[in-house]
Image: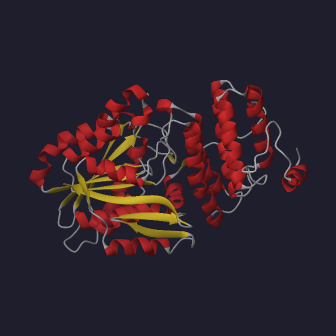
Amino acid sequence: MNKNSTNNQIQRARPWPGFHTSKNLGTIGDTNCMEQLLVHCANAIESNDATLAQQILWVLNNIVPPDGDSNQRLTCGFLRALIVRAAKIGTCKLLTTNLNHSMETHKFSIIELASFVDLTPWHRFGFTAANGAILEAVEGYSIIHIVDFSLTHCMQIPTLIDAISTRLEGPPFVKLTVAGATEDLPPMLDLSYEELGTKLVNFARSRNVMMEFRVIPSSSSDGFSNVIEQLRVQNLIRPENGEALVINCHMMLHYIPEETTLSNRFTSECTSNSFRTMFLKAIRNLDPTIVVLVDEDADFTSNNLVCRLRSAFNYLWIPYDTADTFLPRGSKQRQWYEADICWKIENVIAHEDLQRLERIEPKSQWVQRMRNANFRSRGFSEEGVTEVKNMLDEHAAGWGLKKDEEDLVLTWKGHNVVFATAWVPL
């Protein structure tokens, strides 16, 4: 189907081939219509109705160009994911060979990644909120041990070092322990953690801050047990040294398997002994000075594909929509940015069991988990909130900030995006 015929089809709103048009489906090409088509397709794939699935995939392939508007690009990401799922379970084998929707993630240099992260508040919001809370919590300590569970490869740390270096009582000695995840999670870096550590130590030295760097290879699949064990052994001497222990969790904990990873017959046992529960209890036993938890405010945990698809579709339109405000069409940065989103979509939609790593939970669920692990909310100071607001002023007008009890939430056009919480032991 060529572009003109596609446009004509959109304008005429013809019935879809292979199934009856519902009055709730919407006008061909609008967002509601595309979501419903994706749902119909997911149901067809799950019921192994190859004919219907292929018909819907064919229609979607002709109305969602990869370089279209934000909703078309969003739908295209889900189309790719459904094609991968169909191929994995044996549905639509003939169609999948004829559709070209591949997209490769990019390995960033450290300069590229730093610039990439600065493009949007998606990560900067968490950096700014967390750094403010950390600086207040470690005031007066001469030794600060930061344990960084971060998706962004320590991109938060230079700003924190800058702030620490200006303390009136002089800069502390900083220990930085990085949980080097063994999984390939975007954004990916093109240098080793050892090389990254050298750069960070040199940067800290340039700010008159003495820093010790250590990376502990670890896996989210076992709740970072290797990191926890090494921290437990080292923590035995920490109180004698008057050392502050900071646990910084930035969009990494949702990769730890949660209860729905296991089959229903294990659910009751898993609820009290899941890796997420065990991780938080182990962190609590270390008696940290502060724990900062930042993550995306959505729910991708359902074992039902359609529920998961709807939840992801109604959250992941946000990064596509924001991309139109700061990344020109056809730019390399937009390709890298949207390839990472497509990786997330594919993982949520195409995979199951332990292969499905993206298991984001909403803020309310993490708040309950933290309380169950005997933490209490510390909140954010007015000065810290002002810092976040000033940072948001550097970005597009659609970004906003709201306070939810003692927590902070980044919004886009009024919709929750990322939350930031700070915790101390009870």
Q: Where is residue 344 in the image (x, y as percent from the top left)?
A: 55, 44
Furthest toward the front, the residue is 23
30 and 156: which is toward the camera: 30
Which residue is rendered at x = 75% and y = 38% of the image? 57
222 and 299: which is toward the camera: 299
200 and 47: which is toward the camera: 47
| Quadrant where the image shows the C terminus | bottom left
Furthest toward the top, the residue is 90
Report the coloring of the rendering.
Answer: secondary structure
Which residue is rendered at x = 12% and y = 46% of the image? 237
* Left or right side of 276 for 306: right
Residue 266 vertical position relative to residue 389 in the rendered view, above or below = above
Q: Position of residue 321 (x, y in %)?
A: 63, 60
Q: How many labels does the image show?
A: 0
Q: Where is residue 205 in the image (x, y as percent from the top left)?
A: 31, 61
- Asked if one can make out residue 311 in the rendered structure from this viewpoint, the answer is yes
Which residue is rendered at x = 41% and y = 47% of the image? 252
* Left or right side of 64 for 264: left
Instruction: State which quadrant residue 377 falls in.
Output: bottom left
